[in-house]
Image (cartoon, rainbow, N blue to C red):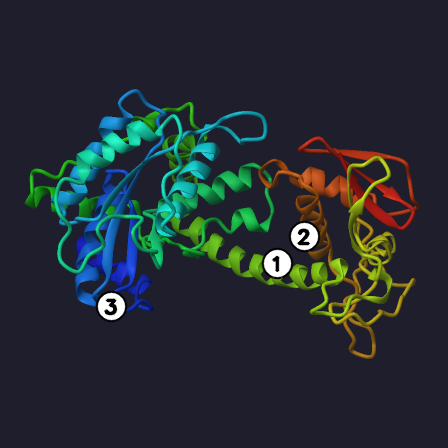
């Protein structure tokens, strides 16, 4: 943080790409805004140092009347910075029931386009293809430099860089907190997530913007684009940025953004541990051959319900014992001793986690709910529309005696207890 802005951005990018070697291809998601231009400029410098092939991908969401012109201009800016591998992709943002709104739908469309570019998949033919083809021709007139790919999509990329900053992370955490989301949501964005890497996640937005401004000062042709959506209070994230965070800073003092980003790092470590634990339990519930399932879960599997709808059996013997407090087996498949005298919390989950002999105790609620969520998603519930309330109400079916009550779920599905099974049907 004591470095000049451009040096700080380059150092962050250098650290993010340290595991790559000469000849590896890296793509930078570039909107033409200050953050993405600063990221691309740094990636090109670091790429030359490390022998990497650096390209830019511009995604045209088509959400504004002049979005095509903005995409072409972003490609021109990338070329001014010295990037000769530029790919412009037009996408269709579909907003409807279960989409989570225009921001979420645009994010999914953008990520799908970036993955397609990184994996070398050709653009799909469709209504947007002629426009996309025209824009590609507008940015592909120059021949590639020797040794570089002839264009994005000709080779697979080792990584895709995104320009999210520490301020973006703080906004994400605050939005998750306002929604009453769980630990995973409070964990914010990961610095690495599959193909995607976010080198600037620990840098303040002001530092990144200063790096872009310095580059523009040295080359007047560089004119970072300001997205009008970033000032549109119709978007929740804009209201958080323009009103909520400044109000918190005013009331609590400076450092709120740093604290929220730090919360994300701590929450991510906890969420990763709980998810890994739930993965092991889910493998047993499914009866995955690689790990011996618990004795009570031997009938787990996916079949057809009598009505013809999808039926997912939740290894009922293991799941329904949450009525007494937790899953009835530890993650090694060994049955646990019951201790009916042990106290329970308000949700009916046992407080005991280890018996006098040192063996694992009942699974905590955080693991049980994660297993239930995996069950519902595998049954066909759209993950983006599945809320904590849905998961809580389905988990409640596992407590107490069997009932004919059903829980309505996204995707037109229903969950209910049938004897020792938890069943999800259309």
- Nearest to the observer: residue 229 or residue 210: 229
Tell me how far mark 1 sits from mark 2, CA to CA: 7 Å
Q: Considering the numbered disc 1 on the image, is that residue within a helix, a strand or a loop?
A: helix
* Residue 22, numbered label: 3
Query: Which quarter of the picture shows residue 195?
Result: bottom left
Q: Is residue 343 left or right of residue 18?
A: right
Residue 368 is situated, as x and y percent measured from the top left of the image, at 73, 54
* First of labels 3, 1 by sequence position: 3
Q: Considering the numbered disc 3 on the image, is that residue within a helix, a strand or a loop?
A: loop
* First of labels 1, 2 by sequence position: 1
Q: Is residue 7 visible?
A: yes
Residue 393 is situated, as x and y percent measured from the top left of the image, at 76, 39
Query: On the image, numbered disc 2 is attached to which residue?
Result: 370
Query: Which quarter of the picture shows residue 382?
Result: top right
Identify the residue at image location x=17%, y=62%: 48
* First of labels 2, 3 by sequence position: 3
Q: Residues within 10 Å of mark 2 (few under 14, many from 20)?
A: many
Q: Considering the numbered disc 2 on the image, is that residue within a helix, a strand or a loop?
A: helix
Above/below status of 272 relative to 83: below
Q: Is residue 230 visible?
A: no
Q: Residues within 10 Å of mark 1 (few under 14, many from 20)?
A: some
Query: On the image, numbered disc 1 is attached to which residue?
Result: 275
**Mark 3 against mark 1, which lies toward the viewer?**
3
Q: Quadrant of the C terminus?
A: top right
**Mark 2 against mark 3, which lies toward the viewer?**
3
Q: Residues within 10 Å of mark 3 (few under 14, many from 20)?
A: few
Q: How many marks?
A: 3
Q: Is residue 370 left or right of residue 52?
A: right
């Amino acid at each position: 943080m004591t470095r000049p802005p451009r040096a700080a951005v380059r150092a962050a990018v250098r650290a993010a790409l340290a595991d790559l070697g000469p000849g590896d291809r890296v793509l930078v998601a570039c909107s033409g805004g200050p953050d993405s231009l600063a990221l691309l400029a740094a990636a090109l410098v670091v790429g030359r140092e490390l022998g990497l092939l650096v390209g830019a991908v511009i995604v045209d969401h088509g959400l504004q009347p002049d979005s095509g012109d903005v995409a072409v201009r972003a490609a021109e800016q990338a070329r001014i910075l010295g990037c000769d591998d530029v790919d412009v992709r037009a996408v269709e943002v579909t907003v409807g029931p279960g989409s989570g709104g225009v921001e979420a739908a645009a994010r999914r469309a953008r990520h799908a386009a970036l993955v397609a570019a990184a994996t070398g998949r050709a653009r799909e033919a469709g209504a947007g293809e002629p426009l996309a083809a025209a824009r590609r021709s507008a940015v592909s007139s120059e021949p590639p430099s020797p040794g570089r790919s002839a264009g994005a999509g000709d080779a697979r990329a080792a990584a895709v860089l995104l320009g999210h900053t520490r301020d973006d992370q703080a906004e994400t955490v605050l939005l998750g907190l306002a929604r009453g989301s769980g630990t995973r949501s409070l964990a914010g964005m990961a610095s690495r997530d599959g193909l995607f890497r976010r080198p600037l996640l620990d840098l303040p937005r002001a530092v990144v913007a200063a790096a872009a401004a310095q580059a523009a000062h040295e080359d007047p042709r560089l004119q970072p684009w300001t997205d009008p959506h970033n000032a549109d209070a119709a978007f929740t994230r804009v209201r958080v940025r323009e009103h909520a965070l400044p109000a918190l800073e005013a009331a609590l003092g400076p450092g709120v953004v740093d604290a929220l980003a730090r919360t994300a790092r701590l929450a991510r470590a906890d969420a990763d541990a709980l998810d890994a634990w739930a993965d092991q339990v889910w493998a047993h519930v499914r009866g995955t051959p690689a790990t011996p399932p618990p004795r009570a879960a031997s009938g787990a599997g996916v079949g057809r319900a009598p009505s013809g709808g999808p039926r997912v059996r939740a290894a009922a013997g293991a799941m329904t014992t949450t009525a007494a407090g937790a899953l009835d087996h530890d993650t090694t498949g060994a049955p646990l001793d019951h201790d009916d005298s042990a106290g329970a919390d308000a949700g009916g989950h046992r407080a005991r986690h280890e018996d006098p002999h040192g063996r694992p105790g009942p699974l905590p609620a955080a693991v049980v709910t994660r297993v239930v969520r995996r069950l519902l998603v595998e049954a066909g519930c759209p993950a983006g529309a599945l809320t904590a309330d849905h998961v809580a109400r389905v988990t409640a079916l596992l407590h107490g005696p069997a009932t004919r009550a059903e829980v309505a779920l996204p995707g037109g599905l229903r969950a209910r207890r049938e004897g020792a099974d938890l069943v999800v049907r259309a």
